[in-house]
Amino acid sequence: MLTGGCNCKSVTFSVAQPVQATACHCGQCRKQTGHHWASGHMPVTDFKITGEVCWFDSSPNAKRGFCPTCGCFLFWKHNDEDKMSFSLGAIDGPTGLTLHRHIFTADKGDYYTIADADPPREQDT
């Protein structure tokens, strides 16, 4: 079980393992986080969320969930999926995970590189 939450702890969550870690390099994730967004992705039914989450419709296809008090970006959900992503940076303590893949690498920032030894890269998904 992984547990996490926002900076002010108004929103907390727990998820069951196993989780595959993904780094998203799309422009929206970079603007939202200041770099790429590392997340786990799993069925909504595997989440336990406490507190009020505000949702921002970031595109016609997806929304982003954040704490209304401290503004931490915690969740991403495609409108047509029964799965949701959560921020690995919001996990309390070590995750024990390794990065599984990179997505939207064509949109990555020009100030960093993705090492050849890193997991597979997908230009867009």
Image (spheres, rainbow, N blue to C red):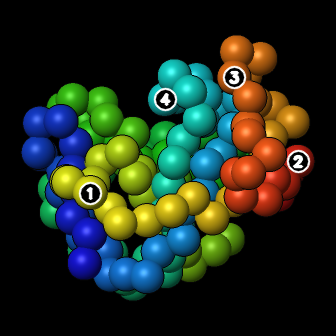
Mark 4 or mark 2: name the one nearer the start of the chain.
4
Residue 123 percent coordinates (x, y): 88, 48
Residue wearing tag 1: 94
Residue 79 percent coordinates (x, y): 63, 64
Q: Does 14 sit above or below residue 82? A: above
Label count reads 4
Residue 98 percent coordinates (x, y): 51, 62
Residue wearing tag 4: 33
Residue wearing tag 2: 123
Amino acid type assigned to the residue bearing label 3 in the image: Tyr
Q: Quarter-wise, where is residue 4 in the image?
A: bottom left
Would you say the residues marked 1 and 2 are in contact, meaning their CB atoms lie under 8 Å apart? no
* C-alpha separation, residue under disc 1 versus residue under disc 2: 29 Å
Amino acid type assigned to the residue bearing label 4 in the image: Thr
Point out the image quarter for the C terminus. bottom right
Residue wearing tag 3: 112
| 96 displayed left or right of 52 | right
* C-alpha separation, residue under disc 1 versus residue under disc 3: 24 Å
